[in-house]
Image (cartoon, grey):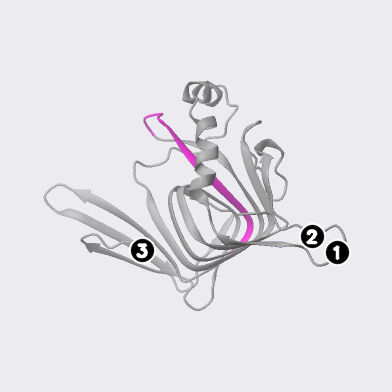
Amino acid sequence: MQEARLPSDTPPGPAPEVTGRVGWRRFAVLTVPALAVTAGLGIALSQGALAASFAVSGQQFKVSAESLTGQGFAQYGGIDVNAREELIPVAVTAIKQAELRSLCQSVVTTLPVIGDISLNLTAGRGTPVEATDLFVDATQLGGDAVFTNIEIGRDASTLDKGPDGSQGMQDLFGQQADTVRIAKLRQTAWATNAGTFKLSGLNMTVAKGKKECF
């Protein structure tokens, strides 16, 4: 992704947009070296310097959507903790207000004798899913994205466009934008938090076998 720039002799115009395929793997390459110092992060967690609202499960889940539109976007590196107090590096995506169309969420559990069991949740095929103060702790995210007024490489502790509390550790990589639009959203995550989460047309199914959103 490249930041859009206006030539010096061009009069001011509408807010620039940045568009293109999301380079989330590049983001991870920039973030992981800072997250690799797990011993120091463990000390920070034990001293309360990092927030750990709950222990994440030992399973990741997949989420897809036809589109996501958001106001107030921020992203930075973070750490989740499981019940065994193991540290899990993640990329935290935070959005003040979000709408998702044709949302799908899936998780696969493998049980002895029975084998794979899939839980699938769908919503927003008519009226879009609505969320406020949305936080997603992901290890993979992809899609076709458009940002407005994006700031890439900002210190994660100084981010101010996302929801309250959407800041990372000082000296870590962060990025933010006024708005974000992602088509063909695909992500793998450990946890999702939201102030409100309104799922129109909610449907949940449990089936034998491996049946994921993507």
Amino acid at pointer 3? Cys
Rendered residue at 52%/23% (across/down)? 46
Give the mark count: 3
Where is residue 173? Give x, y as percent: 62, 38
Where is residue 110? Give x, y as percent: 22, 49
- Secondary structure, mark 1, is loop
Q: Is 123 left or right of 179, judged from the image as shown? A: left
Q: Quadrant of the C terminus?
A: bottom left
Q: Quadrant of the N terminus?
A: bottom right
Cα–Cα span, label 3 and label 1: 45 Å
Residue highlighted by disc 2? 6
Residue highlighted by disc 3? 213
Is 151 placed above or below 21 here? above
Q: Which residues are magenta?
A: 83-98
Residue highlighted by disc 1? 10
- Secondary structure, mark 3, is loop
Query: Does the residue at mark 1 contact the one at mark 2 (Cβ under 8 Å)?
Result: yes
- 2 or 3: tag closer to the N-terminus: 2
- Secondary structure, mark 2, is loop
